Protein backbone atom coordinates (compact mmCIF):
# COMPACT_ATOMS: atom_id res chain seq x y z
CA UNK A 1 0.00 0.00 0.00
CA UNK A 2 1.45 3.43 -0.88
CA UNK A 3 2.67 5.55 1.99
CA UNK A 4 1.17 8.99 2.53
CA UNK A 5 3.74 11.81 2.49
CA UNK A 6 2.88 15.29 3.78
CA UNK A 7 4.92 18.06 2.13
CA UNK A 8 5.20 21.30 4.11
CA UNK A 9 6.30 24.59 2.50
CA UNK A 10 4.61 23.14 -0.57
CA UNK A 11 4.56 26.36 -2.61
CA UNK A 12 8.24 27.16 -1.98
CA UNK A 13 11.45 26.56 -3.94
CA UNK A 14 12.61 23.25 -2.45
CA UNK A 15 9.23 21.62 -1.83
CA UNK A 16 8.01 22.44 -5.34
CA UNK A 17 11.05 20.60 -6.69
CA UNK A 18 10.37 17.75 -4.25
CA UNK A 19 6.80 17.36 -5.48
CA UNK A 20 8.22 17.15 -9.02
CA UNK A 21 10.74 14.53 -7.87
CA UNK A 22 7.99 12.46 -6.22
CA UNK A 23 5.28 12.78 -8.84
CA UNK A 24 5.95 9.40 -10.51
CA UNK A 25 6.55 7.63 -7.18
CA UNK A 26 4.27 5.11 -5.54
CA UNK A 27 3.26 7.50 -2.75
CA UNK A 28 0.15 9.49 -1.88
CA UNK A 29 1.20 13.13 -1.70
CA UNK A 30 -0.35 15.74 0.55
CA UNK A 31 0.59 19.41 0.34
CA UNK A 32 0.26 21.77 3.31
CA UNK A 33 -0.54 25.34 2.23
CA UNK A 34 -1.61 28.45 4.07
CA UNK A 35 -3.82 29.69 1.28
CA UNK A 36 -5.79 27.30 -0.89
CA UNK A 37 -6.28 29.89 -3.61
CA UNK A 38 -2.68 29.52 -4.81
CA UNK A 39 -2.67 25.72 -4.68
CA UNK A 40 -4.21 24.77 -8.05
CA UNK A 41 -0.83 23.74 -9.46
CA UNK A 42 -0.33 21.35 -6.53
CA UNK A 43 -3.59 19.50 -7.17
CA UNK A 44 -2.74 19.30 -10.87
CA UNK A 45 0.55 17.66 -9.95
CA UNK A 46 -1.24 14.98 -7.95
CA UNK A 47 -1.03 16.31 -4.39
CA UNK A 48 -4.03 16.47 -2.10
CA UNK A 49 -4.11 19.97 -0.66
CA UNK A 50 -4.61 20.63 3.07
CA UNK A 51 -4.81 24.11 4.55
CA UNK A 52 -2.74 24.71 7.68
CA UNK A 53 -0.44 27.32 9.17
CA UNK A 54 2.75 26.33 10.99
CA UNK A 55 2.25 29.44 13.16
CA UNK A 56 -1.05 27.98 14.37
CA UNK A 57 -0.77 24.53 16.04
CA UNK A 58 -4.54 24.10 16.12
CA UNK A 59 -4.75 24.27 12.32
CA UNK A 60 -2.44 21.29 11.75
CA UNK A 61 -4.01 17.96 12.96
CA UNK A 62 -6.23 17.27 9.89
CA UNK A 63 -3.25 17.46 7.52
CA UNK A 64 -1.16 15.07 9.65
CA UNK A 65 -3.85 12.46 10.33
CA UNK A 66 -3.15 9.19 8.47
CA UNK A 67 0.31 10.32 7.30
CA UNK A 68 3.38 8.03 7.46
CA UNK A 69 6.07 10.47 6.29
CA UNK A 70 6.48 14.23 6.77
CA UNK A 71 8.78 16.49 4.76
CA UNK A 72 9.37 19.32 7.21
CA UNK A 73 10.47 22.65 5.78
CA UNK A 74 10.17 25.82 7.81
CA UNK A 75 10.43 29.33 6.36
CA UNK A 76 13.28 31.56 7.44
CA UNK A 77 12.40 33.79 10.35
CA UNK A 78 12.48 34.06 14.12
CA UNK A 79 9.46 31.76 14.44
CA UNK A 80 11.14 28.85 12.61
CA UNK A 81 11.70 26.78 15.80
CA UNK A 82 8.08 27.31 16.82
CA UNK A 83 6.96 26.27 13.32
CA UNK A 84 9.09 23.15 13.51
CA UNK A 85 7.89 22.36 17.04
CA UNK A 86 4.25 22.66 15.96
CA UNK A 87 4.83 20.29 13.04
CA UNK A 88 6.79 17.76 15.11
CA UNK A 89 4.11 17.76 17.78
CA UNK A 90 1.32 17.34 15.22
CA UNK A 91 3.31 14.48 13.68
CA UNK A 92 3.79 12.75 17.04
CA UNK A 93 0.15 13.11 17.96
CA UNK A 94 -0.89 11.66 14.58
CA UNK A 95 1.44 8.64 14.87
CA UNK A 96 3.68 9.69 11.94
CA UNK A 97 6.50 7.19 11.41
CA UNK A 98 9.24 9.35 9.87
CA UNK A 99 10.13 13.03 9.51
CA UNK A 100 12.69 14.25 6.97
CA UNK A 101 13.70 17.80 7.87
CA UNK A 102 15.30 20.53 5.81
CA UNK A 103 17.96 22.21 7.94
CA UNK A 104 20.94 24.23 6.72
CA UNK A 105 24.66 23.72 6.17
CA UNK A 106 26.63 24.19 9.38
CA UNK A 107 23.58 24.24 11.68
CA UNK A 108 24.97 24.32 15.22
CA UNK A 109 24.48 26.07 18.53
CA UNK A 110 27.64 28.08 17.77
CA UNK A 111 26.94 28.71 14.07
CA UNK A 112 27.82 32.24 12.90
CA UNK A 113 24.26 32.96 11.72
CA UNK A 114 20.97 33.11 13.57
CA UNK A 115 19.48 30.83 10.90
CA UNK A 116 22.08 28.15 11.64
CA UNK A 117 21.50 28.43 15.38
CA UNK A 118 17.70 28.30 15.04
CA UNK A 119 17.91 25.26 12.76
CA UNK A 120 20.15 23.55 15.33
CA UNK A 121 17.40 23.89 17.95
CA UNK A 122 14.88 22.21 15.65
CA UNK A 123 17.33 19.52 14.58
CA UNK A 124 17.88 18.59 18.25
CA UNK A 125 14.15 18.54 18.93
CA UNK A 126 13.47 16.21 16.01
CA UNK A 127 16.34 13.90 17.02
CA UNK A 128 14.62 13.40 20.39
CA UNK A 129 11.08 13.14 19.02
CA UNK A 130 10.81 9.35 19.17
CA UNK A 131 9.96 9.20 15.44
CA UNK A 132 12.39 8.07 12.76
CA UNK A 133 14.23 11.09 11.41
CA UNK A 134 16.66 12.26 8.78
CA UNK A 135 18.07 15.77 8.56
CA UNK A 136 19.25 17.35 5.30
CA UNK A 137 21.65 20.28 5.62
CA UNK A 138 22.05 21.84 2.18
CA UNK A 139 24.55 24.49 1.24
CA UNK A 140 23.74 27.81 -0.50
CA UNK A 141 21.13 27.28 -3.21
CA UNK A 142 22.20 27.97 -6.82
CA UNK A 143 18.57 29.07 -7.23
CA UNK A 144 19.38 32.11 -5.01
CA UNK A 145 21.00 33.43 -8.19
CA UNK A 146 17.51 33.80 -9.67
CA UNK A 147 17.13 36.76 -7.29
CA UNK A 148 19.78 38.46 -9.46
CA UNK A 149 18.13 37.47 -12.75
CA UNK A 150 16.42 40.83 -13.26
CA UNK A 151 19.71 42.73 -12.86
CA UNK A 152 21.62 40.28 -15.04
CA UNK A 153 19.00 40.43 -17.78
CA UNK A 154 18.88 44.23 -17.68
CA UNK A 155 22.54 45.17 -17.10
CA UNK A 156 24.71 42.05 -17.41
CA UNK A 157 25.88 42.60 -13.83
CA UNK A 158 24.91 41.44 -10.35
CA UNK A 159 25.94 42.79 -6.97
CA UNK A 160 26.41 40.74 -3.81
CA UNK A 161 28.23 41.48 -0.55
CA UNK A 162 30.07 38.17 -0.75
CA UNK A 163 33.51 39.54 -1.68
CA UNK A 164 35.61 36.66 -3.08
CA UNK A 165 33.82 33.97 -1.06
CA UNK A 166 34.02 30.40 -2.26
CA UNK A 167 30.81 28.46 -1.71
CA UNK A 168 29.98 24.78 -2.34
CA UNK A 169 26.63 25.83 -3.78
CA UNK A 170 24.00 23.22 -4.67
CA UNK A 171 21.21 23.01 -7.21
CA UNK A 172 17.84 22.76 -5.42
CA UNK A 173 16.80 19.99 -7.80
CA UNK A 174 19.50 17.81 -6.21
CA UNK A 175 18.27 18.62 -2.69
CA UNK A 176 14.78 17.58 -3.81
CA UNK A 177 16.02 14.35 -5.39
CA UNK A 178 17.98 13.49 -2.22
CA UNK A 179 14.86 14.16 -0.13
CA UNK A 180 12.80 11.98 -2.47
CA UNK A 181 15.41 9.20 -2.24
CA UNK A 182 15.28 9.27 1.56
CA UNK A 183 11.47 9.41 1.63
CA UNK A 184 11.12 6.49 -0.80
CA UNK A 185 13.68 4.25 0.92
CA UNK A 186 12.74 2.06 3.87
CA UNK A 187 12.17 4.22 6.99
CA UNK A 188 15.06 2.50 8.81
CA UNK A 189 17.60 3.07 6.03
CA UNK A 190 18.40 6.73 6.72
CA UNK A 191 17.08 6.94 10.29
CA UNK A 192 19.45 8.96 12.51
CA UNK A 193 21.43 10.37 9.58
CA UNK A 194 22.32 14.03 9.04
CA UNK A 195 23.38 14.67 5.46
CA UNK A 196 25.30 17.81 4.47
CA UNK A 197 24.44 18.35 0.80
CA UNK A 198 26.62 20.47 -1.50
CA UNK A 199 27.33 20.91 -5.17
CA UNK A 200 30.34 19.24 -6.78
CA UNK A 201 32.74 22.19 -6.31
CA UNK A 202 33.26 25.36 -4.39
CA UNK A 203 32.86 28.48 -6.55
CA UNK A 204 33.55 32.19 -6.41
CA UNK A 205 30.98 34.56 -7.88
CA UNK A 206 33.47 35.54 -10.59
CA UNK A 207 33.37 31.87 -11.63
CA UNK A 208 29.58 31.86 -11.43
CA UNK A 209 29.52 34.94 -13.69
CA UNK A 210 31.78 33.19 -16.18
CA UNK A 211 29.42 30.18 -16.34
CA UNK A 212 26.44 32.46 -16.83
CA UNK A 213 28.37 34.22 -19.62
CA UNK A 214 29.01 30.89 -21.33
CA UNK A 215 25.36 29.82 -21.04
CA UNK A 216 23.89 33.18 -22.09
CA UNK A 217 26.42 34.04 -24.78
CA UNK A 218 26.86 37.59 -23.49
CA UNK A 219 28.99 39.24 -20.78
CA UNK A 220 28.02 38.80 -17.14
CA UNK A 221 30.02 40.53 -14.42
CA UNK A 222 29.95 40.10 -10.65
CA UNK A 223 30.26 43.43 -8.82
CA UNK A 224 31.12 42.95 -5.13
CA UNK A 225 29.43 45.52 -2.88
CA UNK A 226 29.68 46.31 0.83
CA UNK A 227 27.20 45.20 3.49
CA UNK A 228 25.61 48.66 3.79
CA UNK A 229 24.90 48.93 0.06
CA UNK A 230 23.36 45.44 -0.05
CA UNK A 231 21.31 46.13 3.07
CA UNK A 232 19.90 49.31 1.52
CA UNK A 233 19.01 47.47 -1.70
CA UNK A 234 17.26 44.59 0.09
CA UNK A 235 15.34 46.88 2.45
CA UNK A 236 14.34 48.90 -0.62
CA UNK A 237 12.84 45.74 -2.13
CA UNK A 238 10.80 45.27 1.05
CA UNK A 239 12.80 42.33 2.44
CA UNK A 240 12.08 42.17 6.22
CA UNK A 241 14.84 43.52 8.47
CA UNK A 242 15.26 40.17 10.28
CA UNK A 243 15.99 38.49 6.94
CA UNK A 244 18.34 41.31 5.88
CA UNK A 245 20.27 40.93 9.14
CA UNK A 246 20.44 37.15 8.68
CA UNK A 247 21.68 37.50 5.11
CA UNK A 248 24.39 39.88 6.29
CA UNK A 249 25.52 37.31 8.87
CA UNK A 250 25.75 34.70 6.11
CA UNK A 251 27.59 37.11 3.81
CA UNK A 252 30.17 37.84 6.50
CA UNK A 253 30.62 34.15 7.29
CA UNK A 254 30.98 33.24 3.61
CA UNK A 255 33.34 36.14 2.92
CA UNK A 256 35.58 34.79 5.70
CA UNK A 257 35.74 31.34 4.03
CA UNK A 258 33.10 29.55 6.15
CA UNK A 259 31.23 28.19 3.11
CA UNK A 260 34.25 26.77 1.27
CA UNK A 261 33.32 23.12 1.58
CA UNK A 262 31.93 20.28 -0.48
CA UNK A 263 30.79 16.75 0.29
CA UNK A 264 30.10 13.76 -1.96
CA UNK A 265 26.82 12.97 -0.20
CA UNK A 266 24.59 13.89 -3.17
CA UNK A 267 26.49 11.47 -5.41
CA UNK A 268 26.33 8.82 -2.67
CA UNK A 269 22.55 9.14 -2.34
CA UNK A 270 21.71 9.54 -6.03
CA UNK A 271 24.38 7.37 -7.69
CA UNK A 272 25.35 10.22 -10.03
CA UNK A 273 27.35 13.43 -9.64
CA UNK A 274 25.68 16.51 -8.20
CA UNK A 275 24.59 19.10 -10.77
CA UNK A 276 27.26 21.63 -11.63
CA UNK A 277 26.85 25.41 -11.97
CA UNK A 278 27.19 24.86 -15.73
CA UNK A 279 24.03 22.69 -15.61
CA UNK A 280 22.18 25.30 -13.57
CA UNK A 281 23.23 28.13 -15.91
CA UNK A 282 22.22 26.19 -19.04
CA UNK A 283 18.87 25.05 -17.63
CA UNK A 284 17.94 28.53 -16.33
CA UNK A 285 19.38 30.65 -19.14
CA UNK A 286 15.95 31.96 -20.09
CA UNK A 287 15.42 33.48 -16.63
CA UNK A 288 18.59 35.58 -17.05
CA UNK A 289 17.74 36.71 -20.58
CA UNK A 290 16.07 40.07 -21.34
CA UNK A 291 12.46 39.78 -22.45
CA UNK A 292 10.78 42.13 -24.91
CA UNK A 293 8.12 42.87 -22.30
CA UNK A 294 9.82 44.49 -19.25
CA UNK A 295 6.84 43.62 -17.03
CA UNK A 296 7.67 39.94 -17.62
CA UNK A 297 11.18 40.29 -16.08
CA UNK A 298 11.83 37.74 -13.29
CA UNK A 299 10.75 39.05 -9.91
CA UNK A 300 13.15 39.34 -6.98
CA UNK A 301 12.34 36.84 -4.24
CA UNK A 302 11.67 38.17 -0.76
CA UNK A 303 14.33 36.07 0.95
CA UNK A 304 17.02 33.52 0.28
N1 LIG B 1 18.37 29.72 0.37
C1 LIG B 1 19.41 28.99 0.73
O1 LIG B 1 20.52 29.14 0.19
C2 LIG B 1 19.23 27.96 1.80
C3 LIG B 1 20.28 27.07 2.03
C4 LIG B 1 20.10 26.07 2.99
C5 LIG B 1 18.90 25.96 3.69
N2 LIG B 1 17.91 26.87 3.45
C6 LIG B 1 16.65 26.71 4.20
O2 LIG B 1 15.61 26.50 3.28
C7 LIG B 1 14.38 26.90 3.89
C8 LIG B 1 13.59 27.71 2.92
O3 LIG B 1 13.29 26.88 1.81
P1 LIG B 1 12.71 27.50 0.45
O4 LIG B 1 13.70 28.49 -0.09
O5 LIG B 1 12.26 26.40 -0.41
O6 LIG B 1 11.48 28.32 1.02
P2 LIG B 1 10.62 29.40 0.28
O7 LIG B 1 10.72 29.26 -1.20
O8 LIG B 1 10.88 30.73 0.93
O9 LIG B 1 9.16 28.92 0.68
C9 LIG B 1 8.71 28.92 2.02
C10 LIG B 1 7.48 28.04 2.09
O10 LIG B 1 7.01 28.03 3.44
C11 LIG B 1 5.63 28.37 3.45
N3 LIG B 1 5.28 29.04 4.69
C12 LIG B 1 5.69 30.26 5.11
N4 LIG B 1 5.17 30.52 6.32
C13 LIG B 1 4.40 29.45 6.65
C14 LIG B 1 3.58 29.12 7.76
N5 LIG B 1 3.46 29.96 8.80
N6 LIG B 1 2.92 27.95 7.75
C15 LIG B 1 3.03 27.08 6.71
N7 LIG B 1 3.80 27.33 5.62
C16 LIG B 1 4.47 28.50 5.61
C17 LIG B 1 5.45 29.26 2.23
O11 LIG B 1 4.09 29.23 1.88
P3 LIG B 1 3.24 30.49 1.35
O12 LIG B 1 3.02 30.21 -0.11
O13 LIG B 1 1.99 30.43 2.14
O14 LIG B 1 4.06 31.73 1.63
C18 LIG B 1 6.34 28.54 1.22
O15 LIG B 1 5.67 27.42 0.69
C19 LIG B 1 14.74 27.64 5.16
O16 LIG B 1 14.55 26.79 6.27
C20 LIG B 1 16.22 27.95 4.95
O17 LIG B 1 16.94 28.09 6.17
C21 LIG B 1 18.03 27.85 2.52
Image (tube, rainbow, N blue to C red):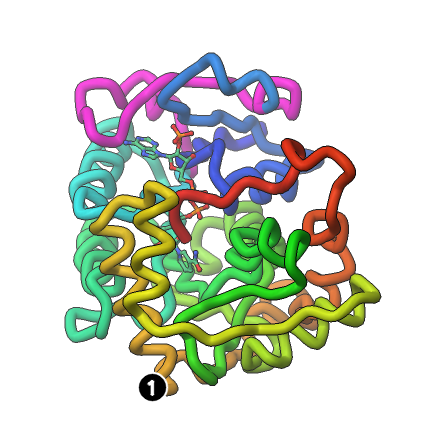
Q: Quadrant of residue 253?
A: bottom left
Left or right, residue 92 beside residue 196: left
Q: In percent of the image, x 41 and y 53: which residue is there?
A: 304
Q: Secondary structure at mark 1?
A: loop
- Disc 1: CA contacts within 10 A as few (<14), some (14-19) or many (>=20): some
Q: In percent of the image, x 22 and y 74: which residue is there?
A: 112
For residue 259, above or below residue 170: below
User: Does 104 lie within the magenta span?
Assistant: no
Q: Position of residue 225 (x, y in %)?
A: 41, 73
Left or right, residue 176 beside residue 250: right
Left or right, residue 96 beside residue 93: right
Ligand 1 quadrant assignment: top left
User: Does 45 lie within the magenta span?
Assistant: yes
Q: In percent of the image, x 69 and y 61: which residue is there?
A: 280
**Is any part of residue 149 visible from this angle?**
yes
Which residue is tagged 1?
Answer: 256
Q: Nearer the viewer, residue 56 or 155?
A: 155
Q: Position of residue 144 (x, y in %)?
A: 51, 57
Left or right, residue 118 beside residue 170: left
Q: Quadrant of residue 201?
A: bottom right
Q: Nearer the viewer, residue 48 or 241?
A: 241
- Image quarter where the N terminus lies is top right
Q: Position of residue 137 (x, y in %)?
A: 40, 64
Amino acid sequence: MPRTVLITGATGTVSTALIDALKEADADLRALVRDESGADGLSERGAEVFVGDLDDARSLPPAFEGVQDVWLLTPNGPRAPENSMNAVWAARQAGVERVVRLSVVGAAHDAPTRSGRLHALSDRELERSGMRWTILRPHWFMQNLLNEAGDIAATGTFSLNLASARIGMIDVRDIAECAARVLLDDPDRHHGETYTLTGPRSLTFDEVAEHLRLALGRPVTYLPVGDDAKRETLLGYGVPKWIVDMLEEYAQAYASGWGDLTTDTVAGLLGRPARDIADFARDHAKAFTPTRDPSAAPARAGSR
